[in-house]
Image (cartoon, rainbow, N blue to C red):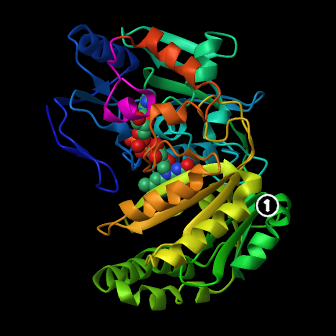
Amino acid sequence: MSAKWSNWAGNETANPQSMVRATSEDHLSHLVARANASGHTVKVPGSGHSFTPAAVTEGHMVDISALQGIRSVDRTSRTVTVGAGTTLNNLNSLLADVGLAMANLGDIAYQTVAGAISTSTHGTGAHLPGLAAQVESFRLVTATGNILNCSSGENPHIFHLGRVSVGALGVVSEYTIKVVDAFRLRAVEEPMRLNDVLDNIQTLVAQNDHFEFFWIPHTKWALTKRNNRTEEPLDPLPKMRGWFEKTFMENYAFGALCYLGRMRPSLIPKLATALPSSGSRTYVNDSYKIFASPRLVRFYEMEHSIPAASLPDALREVVAMIEAKGYLLNFPVEVRFTASDDVALSTSYGRASAYIAVHVFKGMEFEPFFKDVEDIMRRYESRPHWGKIHHREASELSTLYPKFNEFLELRDQLDPARTFANRYTDQVFGR
Ligand SMILES: Cc1cc2nc3c(=O)[nH]c(=O)nc-3n(C[C@H](O)[C@H](O)[C@H](O)COP(=O)(O)OP(=O)(O)OC[C@H]3O[C@@H](n4cnc5c(N)ncnc54)[C@H](O)[C@@H]3O)c2cc1C
């Protein structure tokens, strides 16, 4: 069956030759081997939440949503084995049922485990790396349909290079990931002056388990979020208030402001002043309910990781550029932090990182703005998020990742016929 496919933001579409649902790992391996034998390409999309064409294909698209759920729990080693097509939302609920949780997450949970890990998805927390660093092992279906167990003990070379692979090495059918005992977070959200945030950034990042902020363009304000582990009892936002603030204000009302700004861009600076006044709030909830929230307003996004120490200088350059060029922006600029990790193509490989993310409301022009931001980021040795819009190519990326060429050699070994190639892998890894 062929069908048109589109990503969440709607900026990438595909007309695959076929769209097939793999019902089991064996079925998946058969589908991949058959495509490879007939010289066709295969891509496995997750939830389509990448803004890049990471999952597009004109070849065969294979849906692995049947590879779902927790298969086993090892309480001694605090690991769980999960089907690669499990969504993070589903995983969070299943973990909560057995008193476990992910140590850190991004700000949504619609993604699949495989999609999130394969693109180096991360949350925030100076002592916490991204999701790929939580992987203990995975099972990889290669182009010929072989199934490999990959861990530090078995096929260690593939394990070390292949946790973040943007789907270019094969299809992952299952992961074993590290988890922690379920925990609660105390969330404190409050506006601060951007200059105060930047002047005190080291302390804010070091003193909070999870610190992030959103600078509101056209204002001097940033909304800060500090999430810290707590033993306090649950104290969530009351149901109506939670819905009003998390769903209505952060989505519907914000969406209405965005529509208004798209119709009349000159109103954007005035509309922006409505955002910082949303005040402070404190609440306590289960970790996964605080990390991720609903995202109903659609947008385009670019995000770059830079060495954490460069954040104040880099962000000040972005602010100055926006003001000098007169860009009218109705989305905040988001800043997060992660620990260094050892995942070859992780955006935090070998360095404690800060992330600067810029967003543009769906339907508005984003290219000139994103290119100007990217030019600044380049000066800070930035690594673009694999799932978010950028213009980097293999030649430039190879200078940013010490193990990039080893990854390319492994790709040549595992997928010489380029069964898993698409125009995005051509861009970032070469043909
Ligand atoms: C609203 C929104 C919020 C976001 N928030 C964050 C955030 O907080 N932090 C962050 O870091 N990122 C964030 N992202 C980016 C997102 O996490 C990544 O783009 C992620 O890849 C999306 O997962 P997915 O399941 O939708 O995968 P897709 O986008 O569908 O696919 C991504 C890549 O993974 C590959 N892939 C999927 N399944 C497999 C498999 N089984 N084996 C091998 N390869 C596979 C695909 O082929 C593709 O190359 C956000 C995106 C959106 C739209």
Rendering coords of residue 352 (x, y %): 75, 45
Tell me the residue at 44%/28% (across/down). Answer: 429
Nearest the eye: 99 or 206: 206
**Residue that sits furthest to the left in the current view:** 1
User: Is 329 in front, or is 293?
Assistant: 329
Residue 40: x %, y % from top left: 23, 18
Q: Is ligand 1 less than 8 Å from the beta carbon at label 1?
A: no
User: For mark 1, does the 10 Å Cα neighbourhood hold few (<14), some (14 to 19), or many (20 or more) residues?
Assistant: many
| Above or below, comparing residue 125 to residue 413 in the picture | below
- Reply yes or no: does residue 424 show up in magenta: yes
Question: In percent of the image, x 62 and y 13: which residue is there?
Answer: 157
Identity of the residue drawn at 28% across and 12% down: 36
- Amino acid at dot 1: Val
Q: Name the one closer to the observer, 266 or 119.
A: 266
Residue 109 seen in render = no
Q: How many labels sit on residues? A: 1
Q: Is residue 326 left or right of residue 82?
A: left
| Residue 38 in view, yes or no | yes
Name above or below for residue 413 compared with residue 359.
above
The kind of secondary structure element at disc 1 is helix
Which quarter of the rendered picture does the N terminus lie within?
top left
Based on the displayed image, in which of its 4 quarters is residue 100 positioned? top right
Q: Quadrant of the C terminus?
A: top left
Residue 297: percent from the left, percent from the top?
39, 69
Which residue range is magenta in the image?
417-431
On the image, the x and y values in percent for residue 401 come to 61, 32
Quickly name the residue at label 1. Answer: 205
Q: Residue 132, relative to residue 336: is it above or below?
A: above
Q: Is residue 314 magenta?
A: no
Left or right of residue 394: residue 398: right
